[in-house]
Image (cartoon, rainbow, N blue to C red):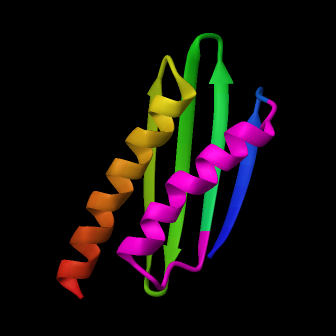
Amino acid sequence: MQLQLTGQNIEITDSLREFTESKFQRLTRQHDRITNIHVVLAVNKLVHFVEAKVHIPGAELHAESESDDMHKSILNVIDKLLRQIEKYKDKH
């Protein structure tokens, strides 16, 4: 799995990178064929926005979340992606 982080109006610190990578490892435990994950972290005034695209052979999953805390937004996106992976696995 390749994880690509992009920051808009935010500097991605080492602690934020480690937190994001550790949380996205949960997705690989649910589905082992994930090839690429692209995560965009953005800050607009007081709103922290996270958008993620997960590439699985035959599908691309997308989720986004915004809140007043970056960690909370990351966790919300993880939860949304886990639900989408479960749906994908049930269909296939």
Which of the 4 image quarters holds residue 62? bottom left
Whether residue 53 is in magenta: the answer is: no
Residue 70 picture location, percent across and down: 56, 28
The chief SS type of the magenta part is helix
Q: Which residues are magenta?
A: 11-36
Measured as percent of width and height from the top left, residue 66 is found at 47, 28
Quarter of the picture holding the C terminus: bottom left
Q: How many marks?
A: 0
Q: Specify whether 9 is left or right of 78.
A: right
Between 41 and 14, the one lying in front of the other is 14
Q: Residue at x 62, y 76 (%)?
A: 1
Q: In screen coordinates, is 68 left or right of 76? A: right
Residue 48 appears at what percent x and percent y? 57, 24
Residue at (36, 73) in percent of width and height: 30
Of 64 and 23, nearer the camera is 23
Q: Is residue 28 magenta?
A: yes
